[in-house]
Amino acid sequence: MRAEAESRFSAEALAAFSRDALALAGADEASADAATRSMLHASRFGVDSHGFRLLPHYAAVIEAGRVKGSPELRFQTGAGAVATLDAGHAQGARAAYAAMDHAVGLAGRFGIGAVAIRNSSHFGAAGAYALAAAEAGFVGFATCNTDSFVRLHDGAERFHGTNPLAFAVPTGDGRPWLLDMATSAIPYNRVLLYRGLGRELPPGTASDEEGRETRDPGAVEMLAPLGAAFGFKGAALAGVAEIFSAVLTGMRLSPEILPMGGPDLSTPREMGAFVMALNPSAFMEPEAFRAGMQRYLTALRGSRPTEGGSVMAPGDREWAEAAGRERDGIPIDPTTLAAFASMAERHGLELPQPVCPAE
């Protein structure tokens, strides 16, 4: 069920429009390509909150000066397999893809590679960078912290961001095992969806301005950590992201990061992130590793489900969604499409043509 009608577009048309729009906003080719690649990843896999709906925001923060359209990326080598990237306030995807490429190179030499990222910005779906490692044959990990929106367990104010953790593992069949999760009980996009549908939120997912649980999406002031009654687990996982992304990089803690939506879009947010790549062949023969992953996935998917249930491995839902969207097109909601039209008019761009117009 959809709150509003959506039009569907080919991935190629959206990607071309995105690159052109970002270039006209002041992004260099590498930044426009990286941001588009990240948004395309999210839109393909059904993570629409981090897909092409972010394009107007990414263009706006480059134009306003928060993000540098032509950044200088500087790697500093640490001990052996460790490096730090000063991203120079680059677009977040530009920094994260560069860092993961570097981590993969280190892992090819040392078996493991880890890169701490400094002076970055919003990088979208963390799974995009973990998946980049898996597609190169490595186990990938990516995380970042974000501005405060999630309370602590038994807390009554915002503290952590939604602080994602993402892992991806090659499987030998072209569809890596993929985990990309926020450490909040639900993403804020779910609150907006339920608000539009006039539906109550699930219990244990959000709180009002006093930190009290609420199921009314219109009263949500903060999200709950993952775990409901055992939310200390979700809060601790958010802390893992915080330590890797802020403490280890010397960047801002979640409560110190400027809000993503402004009103200040000119001051850099000084965000950190962290990526790691692990080379399976440093531990065992590649064929044995792939066979082990296939044995695990076969056993997992063959596990007996509950009546009416479906057992899936992490990533199965996303790969199925990607196949459907490759066939039917990527949905773009009317609000985002209106923002695209405004960008097109301002810059003299041609809007992409839908493969399936809204009904």
Image (cartoon, helix red, strand yellow):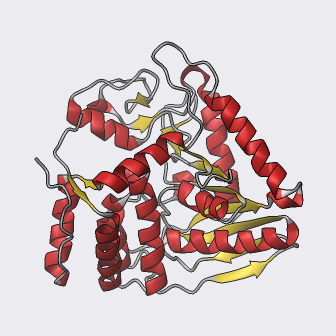
Give me the residue at 68% from left, 57% from top: 140
Q: Position of residue 359 (x, y in %)?
A: 10, 47
Give me the residue at 33% from left, 67% from top: 55
Asked if one can make out residue 126 in the rendered structure from this viewpoint, the answer is: no
Relative vertical location of residue 220 with respect to residue 273 in this rendering, above or below: above
Relative vertical location of residue 109 with respect to residue 338 in this rendering, above or below: below
Between 10 and 82, the one nearer to me in the picture: 10
Relative vertical location of residue 69 with respect to residue 43 in this rendering, above or below: below
The quarter of the displayed image where residue 219 is located: top left
Q: Position of residue 15 (x, y in %)?
A: 35, 71
Is residue 239 found left or right of 262 in the rendered image?
Answer: right
Give me the residue at 22% from left, 52% from top: 333
Give me the residue at 39% from left, 23% from top: 202
Between 168 and 215, the one nearer to me in the picture: 168
- How many labels were placed on the picture? 0
Is residue 310 found left or right of 250 in the rendered image?
Answer: left
Is residue 357 found left or right of 151 in the rendered image?
Answer: left
Asked if one can make out residue 279 in the rendered structure from this viewpoint, the answer is: yes
Is residue 111 found left or right of 247 in the rendered image?
Answer: right
Q: Position of residue 287 (x, y in %)?
A: 81, 54
Q: Quadrant of the N terminus?
A: top left
The quarter of the displayed image where residue 336 is located: bottom left
Kindly give the residue lying farthest to the top in the view shown. Answer: 307
Q: Position of residue 334 (x, y in %)?
A: 17, 54
